[in-house]
Image (cartoon, grey):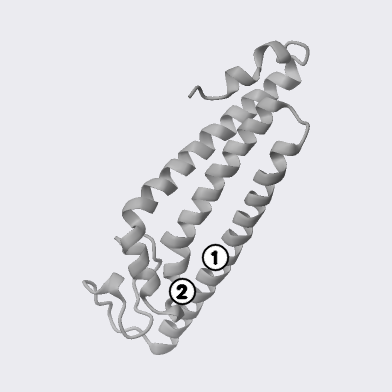
């Protein structure tokens, strides 16, 4: 299942479990070395960027509830931060770490083991983030176009999900 998440059909190193069933035609070693280097750089940089995003989201999720902004906007932004954190965390394990062939194939095997859990999580978080962004846009549109009626329409009870 990892062949969906790891880029490229060529082997990097001696054994690549994602391409065992597929033997590519003979590729010049310079081209293969270049491909493997680009794949490793992609894996390292995207893991660092996603890690910075997770750190930023966690800091925002800690600080956001303490601000004095509109309560409905804070709830929606908090939900968006949670969705984004799950999306980035799932992406690290499913796509970015398995791309680092210099680290060995344990990351690919880990992605194979976690994919039944992480793949639905990444899809649901992407779906939830899209709809939360739409909800934030609608809430902001109402707040800008009808500022005097917004306090009656957008209450905390209407924004929160009932338990």
User: In the figure, 81 relative to 14: above or below?
Assistant: above
Image quarter of the N terminus: bottom left
How many neighbours does mark 1 have within 10 angstroms: few (below 14), some (14-19), or many (20 or more)? many
Q: Could you tell me how far apart the alpha carbons at marks 2 and 1 are, in whole angstroms?
A: 10 Å
**Left or right: 117 in relation to 135:** left
Residue 127: numbered disc = none
Residue 115 lies in quadrant = bottom left
Q: Nearer the viewer, residue 153 or 35?
A: 153
At which x and y percent is residue 43?
Answer: 50, 69
Q: Nearer the viewer, residue 39 or 160?
A: 160
Q: Which residue is mark 2?
A: 100
User: In the figure, 144 relative to 43: above or below?
Assistant: above
How many neighbours does mark 2 have within 10 angstroms: few (below 14), some (14-19), or many (20 or more)? many
Q: Give the secondary structure at mark 1.
A: helix
- Write the residue at 41% across / 69% down: 98
At which x and y percent is residue 120?
Answer: 37, 46
Q: Give the secondary structure at mark 2.
A: loop
Which residue is most to the bottom? 29
- Write the residue at 48% across / 65% down: 96
Q: Are marks 2 and 1 in contact (CB under 8 Å)?
A: yes
- Write the residue at 72% across / 14% down: 151
Q: Which residue is mark 1?
A: 47
For marks 2 and 1, the one nearer the N-term is: 1
**Left or right: 61 in relation to 29:** right
**Left or right: 1 in relation to 156:** left
Residue 81 lies in quadrant = top right
- How many marks can you see? 2
């Amino acid at each position: 299942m990892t062949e969906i998440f790891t880029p490229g059909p060529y082997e990097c190193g001696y054994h690549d479990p994602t391409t065992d069933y597929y033997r590519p035609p003979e590729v010049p070693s310079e081209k293969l070395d270049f491909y493997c280097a680009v794949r490793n750089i992609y894996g390292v940089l995207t893991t660092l960027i996603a890690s910075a995003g997770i750190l930023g989201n966690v800091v925002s999720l800690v600080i956001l509830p303490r601000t004095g902004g509109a309560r409905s906007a804070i709830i929606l932004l908090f939900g968006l931060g949670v969705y984004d954190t799950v999306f980035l965390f799932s992406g690290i394990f499913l796509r970015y770490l398995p791309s680092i062939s210099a680290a060995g194939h344990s990351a690919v095997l880990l992605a194979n083991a976690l994919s039944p859990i992480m793949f639905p999580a990444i899809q649901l978080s992407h779906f939830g983030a899209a709809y939360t962004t739409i909800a934030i846009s609608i809430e902001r549109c109402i707040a800008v176009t009808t500022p005097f009626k917004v306090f009656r329409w957008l209450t905390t009870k209407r924004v929160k999900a009932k338990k």
